Amino acid sequence: MTTRRIQSSRGSLPPLSLPPGALAKTDQQHRYDVDDEPPTIEPIEHRIRLDFMTAGPVRRSQLLDQYNPWTADSSEADPWREAGQSKPFGLLYAEESCRRTLAEERRYYDRVEADPSAELDDVPSFLAHRLQMCRETDDPSAALEEERVRRERWYSTVIPWMNLYHVLKRSSYGSLLPPSVGRSADIDELTEHNAFVGMVVVDDGADIRTVAREHEIPGRFVIHERDLSSSAVECAPSPSDFGIDLPAPLLVGEYASGSRYPLLPWSDGLVCSCPCESPRGQAPRLPVSTT
């Protein structure tokens, strides 16, 4: 498989090797085979990023004071309505995107249910892969229904209620906002509790001191892949799971909670490798920044 090797401006650091799936479609080396490399990022995740970009800034007055995502359910009253607050426009757009996507996907389940051998050429890649997996089970009909229910929960509960609502709190997103509306955010304030550090991620068998000497950097900037927080969560992908060769120079978020997650280059943005969609309903992996 062809990879894109990006050389660091600092010659002593290792290059960053990215698989074709991580490259923007405008890249000449972009090549993606959904059969060989089933997609792990859904179109809805990119759509949500665009929704928030289109909506503009989120105001502090629109953030929730209290919200527990682990006890919440979409059948409950909307927490913004309960608090008498207006929802951020980005959230309104994202919820509509989820409802629209769920409605659009229903016809694909109906097609496969009516004809198990139906073509999937026009089905979005991620969903096509999931439907194909259902076909290959001992009971395709039951697997298809289970997938349908799982997807409905993903769009109606997991994405909005367990993730977006949780982020849009004063204690979460609010900690990134400046205390005064009249002035711009201070970078020192933004990183007072959270830091983003350039590090060299190495495989678990590598010797930290040897790598540090080889690349002429302090040992504190070298980290074993197993020591990233993503390695402690079954459903969270590691850099090597994304097809990124190690050692790799990556940006790592060091958060106030003590967790450390790498930010991985993928298409035209950075993707946080925090816990992703799983049968247990963990958080989705959302692009956090664009280049």
Image: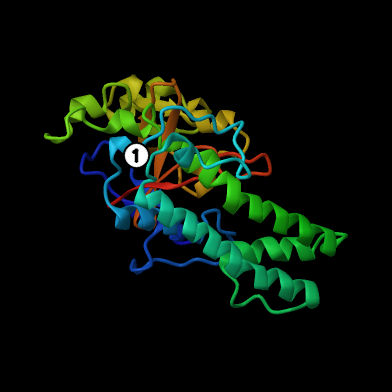
Amino acid carrying label 1: it is: Gln
Please give left or right for residue 162 compared with residue 199 in the image. Answer: right
Q: Position of residue 137 (x, y in %)?
A: 82, 59
> Vertically, is 253 above or below 139?
above
> Residue 199 is drawn in which quadrant?
top left
Is residue 62 in sight in this rendering? Answer: yes
Q: Position of residue 210 (x, y in %)?
A: 39, 24
Q: Identify which residue, 15 or 122, lies in the foreground.
A: 122
Q: Identify which residue, 102 or 12, lies in the foreground.
A: 102
Residue located 72% across and 54% down the image: 149
> Vertically, is 193 above or below 15?
above
Q: Identify which residue, 106 or 72, lies in the foreground.
A: 72
Please give left or right for residue 288 compared with residue 216 in the image. Answer: right
Q: Secondary structure at mark 1?
A: helix
> Vertically, is 20 above or below 216?
below
Is residue 35 in sight in this rendering? Answer: no
Which residue lies under the disc numbered 1?
Answer: 62
Which residue ends up furthest to the right in the rendered image?
A: 138
Residue located 31% across and 54% down the image: 55
Q: Position of residue 218 (x, y in %)?
A: 29, 21
Q: Position of residue 39 (x, y in %)?
A: 55, 58
Please give left or right for residue 111 compared with residue 94 in the image. Answer: right
